Image (cartoon, coloured by chain):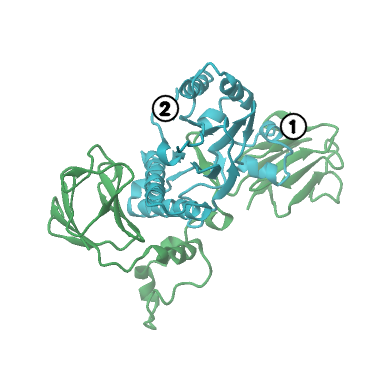
Amino acid sequence: MRTDRGRVREHNEDAVGGDPESGLVLLADGMGGANAGEVASGLAVDLLVSQLTSLLWDGLEVGQTQIRDAVGSVNQAILELADQVSDYQGMGTTLVLGLFLEQRLIYAHVGDSRLYRWRKGALQQLTLDHSMIQEMVNLGDFSCIEEALLAGVPTNVLSRALGSDYQVLVDVEEIRWETGDVYLLCTDGLTGMVTDDEMQSILENQELSLFEQADALVDYACRMGGVDNISVILARPQAVCED
Amino acid sequence: MEKLVILGDDGTPQEFELLQRRMSIGRDAACDICLGDRSVSRHHASLLRVYQGFSIEDERSTNGTRVNGSIVTKRFLKHGDLIEIGKYSLRYIAQVAPQDEDPDRTVVLKPRSMAAPPAESAQSPQSETPANPSGVSASERRPAPASPAAAQTEAQPDSQLASSARVKFMAGDQSGEERVIDRAFFSVGNPGGDLVLINQRHNGYYLLKVGGENTPMINGQPIKAGGVALKDGDNITLGELSLKFLD
């Protein structure tokens, strides 16, 4: 788990968190004036960790519905806090979250923070950004992201974020994980600087531990300009042996 | 509504509202935007609505289409872009002016209905009373059209909770005052400084730290990140501030 201010921004508006024991990892990329971005992302991470771990520790089921509800309550918290504190008006945050359960991974996201899976030497992006450029590609206005970039579509416009509307659509998916998989959660400070191929080459380097790989990803993004905050979480789920 | 302002070399600018999903620009009279000069091809370019904006596509015109001086084949338009077609210059005006200062700042698109300016702070009761001799209260007279403000007030009652829980200020400026925790996320403290949220969940109340240098304490114990359950009579300290939680 790594988060870095980058080379340009004065503040780190990203927040990372989780509870490895419970298999929960998440990160958020906040936005808003003053320190509102940090408040929004920090609130999202703290509130989700607290809500989901308290369910897990009580032995209650945590599935897609519970995750969707918890993210909805974070959205409400951000809007209500912004309503009570004028400095925080208009604050918002992205979110990507992974909950590793026995053999299953439930993941959720809002905005342009991403989840990737590295499996058997191939890196695959599992989430689709909620950004204007991605929506245009989805609608067929452009055939691919590269074409839209060439046509000058800005990449800094999100179509969804927590804190922007009382109704928030959260994408939640569930897959089976396999031993050996590595999951990468990251903010756009990484993906805006480093291509998928470059990320793949770092994840392929078996001489590095997971921690060193996370450091290498952040360092690489900084060397490529580091214009935004960079946050990275790497997770390698392992079967629990109960003898 | 987006529009094009056409600046010909001969006189006053002309405005075209961009109402259709697809509009043709050319010399041909059948074009949606007709530019009658020989420097313009019959069907020179097209404007296409894409998601929340427009892109311009050159239709293999003889003299080409330029945006801000560069020849383009397909280009997503930004507010203020200058399009050159033959001897004409066209200025693209987007509905909402973009964020000024930092082009790297992330912004979130509002749904179209929300992008309109707020409706005069929801016609405040004060401004309405004089023009309201019938004695009907302002809340009953709330305008029917689904203005953005009305849409928000509809969504909010969810957060207004029937609750008996309160906080009593034991020290600080508001010492002695009691406040009912009347929303799901109730903030206490100073914005920009020490700030906590009291969060009502189905199984009780939780204290969450939002910001500030000082760690909030409950009965002298620092709270851990993520929040701690509150019980009746708990003493909350937050820097200079001291509160009692009553349920």
Q: Is residue B8 visible?
A: no
Q: Chain of mark 1?
A: B
Callout 1 crowding tier (Cα within 10 Å): few <14, some 14–19, many ≥20: some
Residue A72: image tag: none
Residue at 42%, 51% in the rendered image: A74
Q: Residue furthest front?
A: A243
Q: Is residue A179 visible?
A: yes
Q: Is residue A213 above or below residue B53?
A: above
Q: Is residue B112 above or below residue A233?
A: below
Residue A5: image tag: 2
In-front residue for pair A86/B220: B220
Q: Colour of chain B?
A: green
Q: Residue furthest top?
A: A207
**Residue on which the image places disc 1:** B72
Amino acid type, callout 2: Arg
Residue at 66%, 40% in the rendered image: B77
